[in-house]
Image (spheres, rainbow, N blue to C red):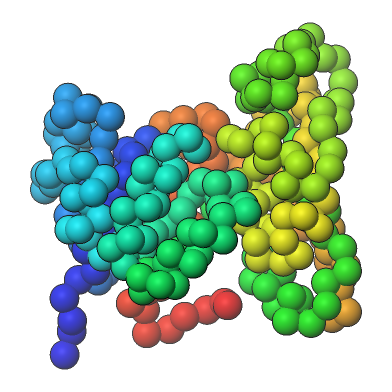
């Protein structure tokens, strides 16, 4: 007997949220149903609803948490707690796209554990998380990620603004900052979600090394990862194509959420 569909809510209808909402609306994710969204305003919600085949209500974060089984967070980093706390307090599942906001947040993990909720971090723009998790069953000795971005995508980061760095005039690639993921996340909160997910899957943010580079020759964000462990050594590289809705967000990020939702009810599941 087929059970009731999983009720999906989406907090934030930017590049990620809108793509996932449209996939749900088109019936492309079997066993899941879009039931509500949260948007910046009723006008924005109305505009977005006009693009859907079946309109859904625009709810507050608290009501979204109450009405849905699973909530996708696609918000600016500073708004993360506003949706995470009510969803986890309600014992629901949170799909967290702002992975950087989970660093050092054992309180959220404990809240989810206590209330019966879950926190899910999709692969997003990072490949190879399955391999990292498998290596972590044994001993991981070293993980390093090198993130290279066009200078314009780093121009508004707190570290760049505070130090008056003029990245737009660069003629060659420059390492803007290096350190642990924990260190870099404080200065580039909107640019380390990939590294945050990588660290949470493996050595943790205090032991995962990171470099952020501004490279004027690049059109797309590029991530290179090197891993050393007792089971295997491996390297990964990915160059992400931007989404149509927002060039700062990789197209594969929303697709990773759709892939996760599809496997929730899949008879055949491939990968860890």
Residue 14, image x and y in percent?
37, 35
Please tell me which residue is depicted at 13% across the width and 46% down the height of the picture: 56
Residue 49, image x and y in percent?
16, 37
Q: Is residue 30 above or below residue 225?
A: below
Residue 112 visible from this viewpoint: yes
Please tell me which residue is depicted at 75% across the width and 11% down the height of the picture: 164
The C terminus sits in image quarter:
bottom right
In the depicted view, which residue is nearer to us: 106 or 221?
A: 106
Q: Quadrant of residue 126?
A: bottom right
Q: Is residue 195 above or below residue 123?
A: above
Tally the marks: 0
Residue 18, image x and y in percent?
32, 41
Please tell me which residue is depicted at 57% across the width and 77% down the height of the picture: 271
Q: Quadrant of residue 19?
A: top left
The N terminus sits in image quarter:
bottom left
Please tell me which residue is depicted at 62% across the width and 19% down the height of the picture: 156
Residue 90, image x and y in percent?
28, 63
In the depicted view, which residue is nearer to us: 222 or 206?
A: 206
Q: Is residue 87 left or right of residue 201?
A: left
In the depicted view, which residue is nearer to us: 128 or 165?
A: 165
Q: Is residue 15 above or below residue 24?
A: above
Residue 26 visible from this viewpoint: no
Q: Is residue 105 left or right of residue 87?
A: right
Q: Is residue 162 left or right of residue 257?
A: right
Q: Quadrant of residue 3?
A: bottom left
Q: Is residue 20 left or right of residue 182?
A: left
Q: Residue furthest bottom?
A: 1
């Amino acid at each position: 007997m087929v059970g009731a569909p999983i009720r999906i809510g989406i907090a934030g209808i930017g590049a990620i949220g809108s793509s996932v909402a449209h996939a749900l609306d088109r019936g492309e994710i079997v066993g899941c149903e879009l039931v509500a969204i949260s948007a910046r305003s009723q006008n924005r919600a109305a505009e977005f609803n006009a693009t859907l085949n079946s309109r859904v209500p625009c709810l507050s974060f608290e009501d979204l948490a109450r009405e849905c089984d699973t909530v996708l967070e696609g918000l600016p980093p500073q708004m993360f707690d506003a949706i995470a706390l009510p969803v986890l307090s309600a014992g629901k599942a949170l799909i967290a796209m702002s992975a950087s906001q989970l660093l050092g947040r054992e309180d959220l993990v404990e809240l989810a554990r206590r209330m019966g909720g879950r926190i899910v971090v999709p692969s997003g723009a990072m490949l190879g998380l399955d391999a990292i998790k498998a290596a972590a069953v044994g001993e991981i000795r070293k993980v390093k990620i090198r993130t290279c971005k066009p200078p314009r995508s780093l121009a508004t980061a707190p570290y760049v603004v505070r130090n008056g760095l003029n990245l737009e005039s660069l003629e060659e690639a420059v390492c803007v900052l290096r350190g642990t993921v924990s260190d870099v996340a404080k200065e580039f909160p909107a640019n380390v979600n990939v590294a945050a997910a990588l660290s949470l899957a493996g050595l943790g943010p205090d032991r995962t090394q990171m470099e952020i580079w501004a490279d004027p020759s690049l059109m797309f964000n590029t991530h290179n990862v090197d891993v050393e462990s007792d089971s295997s050594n491996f390297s990964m590289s990915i160059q992400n194509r931007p989404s149509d809705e927002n060039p700062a967000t990789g197209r594969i990020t929303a697709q990773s959420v759709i892939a996760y939702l599809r496997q929730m009810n899949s008879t055949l599941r491939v990968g860890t």
